[in-house]
Amino acid sequence: MTQQAKYASFETDILVIGGGTAGPMAAIKAKEKNPNLDVVLFEKANVKRSGAISMGMDGLNNAIVPGHATPEQYVKEITIANDGIVNQRTVMAYAQNSFDMIQNLDNWGVKFEKDETGDYNMKKVHHLGTYVLPMPEGHHVKKILYRQLKRKRVNIINRYVSTRLLTGASGEIAGVIGVNSRTGEMVVIRAKAVILATGAAGRLGLPASGYLFGTYENPTNAGDGYSMAYHAGAELSGIECYQINPLIKDYNGPACAYVTGPMGGYTANSKGDRFIECDYWSGQMMLEFYRELESGNGPVFLKLDHLAEETISDIEHILHSNERPSRGRFHERRGNNYRERMVEMHISEIGLCSGHSASGVWVDEHARTTVPGLYAAGDLACVPHNYMLGAFVYGKLAGEDAADYCLDNDLPAVDQQQIDDEYARIMAPTQHSDGITPYQMEYKLRRMVNDYLQPPKVTTKMEIGLQRFAELREDMKYLSAADPHDLMRAMEVYAILDCAEMAARASLYRTESRWGLYHYRVDYPETDNDKWFAHAQLKKDENGEMVCFKRDIEPYIVELNDTEKDAYNKLRITSNQGA
Amino acid sequence: MPFANYKTSVPVIVDADKCIANKGCRVCVEVCPLDVLVIDEEKGTAYMKYDECWYCTPCEADCPTNAVTVNIPYLLR
């Protein structure tokens, strides 16, 4: 009887966790597929303004528009950019749905740049193909999604932190447990299918500024989904392929050399010289960026000061009204005027994010994870370089497949022990009035992540890191939360700690270097295709231990020729007088 | 272990003359991804309670009376 009072409980057909980009699309497409299903969109913040595209987006990085690119070309480009470690079927599933999704968004009112004839105004930024479509008026994306959610009668629940997935007797998905960040109330939601769309692990490394929330990613995305998928028994992949991005120093938002690139801007060293051929983000590009940053020609800058006034005005309009609009006020205070001088850049803290690199929950071409009934989409799901449009496409694939899954499967019985254990874990930080604050614990943890995990990776350092993480895990019993908001932060520290341990173990497992800076191991500097041309997977085994293992790469559906394979390894400009 | 009071200046500033929280407005509090804004019930205005700002600006953009200003946090400026 007392259990009744402890938490609220209800049931649904499909539960979507995360209302940013992939999540709303998954919910909408599930309802379009079958309007009779109950679909709940469960969100940590508020769906109106949550996730990576809270303030919109300045462009599509991977638009496959007929006449400019083909799905086959795109699959080839992403395969090469990822040093061959991809499941091409998943990239192809994205590629084949890419153009339909652009048209779908266009029909809903999302504005893309078009030329005078009404065709999409495509730009070349990638090393090989043409995939970038600017969205100078892209700040309305979230409003447009919200309208569709309301129209399709998706049940939106805001301000709940999801903490653990529930699984049934056969390991299938059974629901989720969450806690309200304003009331501290726990809720148990039983569901036939769950779609995880919780975004990147963006609070893993500590930004150079030392400000915990001055991250590259929206810091609401603390890696909750990586942790939940892991504890539910799902396979994760490519965790060692960290996300590290080139950013405006201190501001820590994208400088967007790839937005300005088609307009004549570029990444330069302190002498104003180009040192990379291509500004598209890849591990290989980041390694050259890192080398230049550390060299006598460093640091690195975004160079626009050679451009015409009207071009610079256009760039300011795009960069200062979309995605991270406070860029403009940062520059103003620093006296950074694109017209007069170059803007100092730096590299981001490490994170896990398949939207930009490859680390995520393993999914197939239907967005299915290895746990029956559990789907993943967006930055969290391992489909390399998927970006915003990939999040929309995989949201759609997940929503539609989950709608079918619900017809064939009943609501699994829940295991009361799982609920009781989680209730105890959630309530623990509220039950003592002194101890360690979530802020302190998080700061220390993320400082250790920087000290021991940040590339260049060194074996002994990562082993020491694991010891420190184990000590922090022991300290978790001292976590103290003064209010429900603090409790949210406390639960996030658990997720960040899981992500840190996964990052260390996956990196130690792959005894070679690959993906440029993302997995540059100083004591294993070479790429070893004989031993390591494989996915490195990670999961929780039957004994509750974190284990790594290899998964074979599926036969390619688009073959690469030998001259193309190395394209991304030749990014440094050799004729540069400064290099 | 007792706690220390660690003071920081906050980046989000709410103009008390313009804020209409006393009329029931909760827009900035609702849209903040980090949930750092709360209402001071006595003063009838919103304020930034938790120093966890991503300077993302929905609070400023969506405020119906332009009462909210998002500054870049001092550590980053």
Image (cartoon, coloured by chain):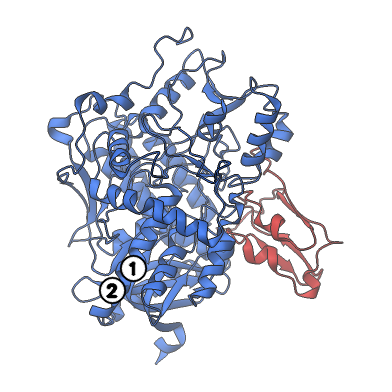
Chain colours: A blue, B red
The type of residue carrying mark 2 is Asp
Q: Are marks 1 and 2 on the same chain?
A: yes
| Mark 1 burial class by Cα count in 10 Å: few <14, some 14-19, many 20+ | many
Residue nearest the viewer, comparing B74 with A21 = A21
Q: Where is residue A12 in the image (x, y as percent from the top left)?
A: 38, 80
Determine the secondary structure under disc 2. helix
Q: Which residue, given by chain and number where applicable, does mark 1 sit on? A: A400
In front here: A402 or A92? A92
Q: How far apart are marks 1 and 2 (CA)?
A: 7 Å
Find the residue positioned furthest to the left.
Answer: A530
| On screen, residue B54 above or below A418 | above
Quadrant containing the C terminus of chain A in the rendered view: top left
Is B9 displayed left or right of A319 in the figure?
Answer: right
Q: What residue type is labelled 1?
A: Glu
Q: In which quarter of the image is the N terminus of chain A?
A: bottom left
Q: Pinpoint the chain carrying mark 1.
A: A
Residue A408 x/y as whole percent: 23, 79
Picture layout, residue A475 above or below residue A88: below
Marks 1/2 in contact by CB < 8 Å: the verdict is: yes
Locate residue A65 relative to residue B52 in the image: left or right: left
Subunit ID for the residue under disc 2: A
Q: Which mark is residue A404?
A: 2
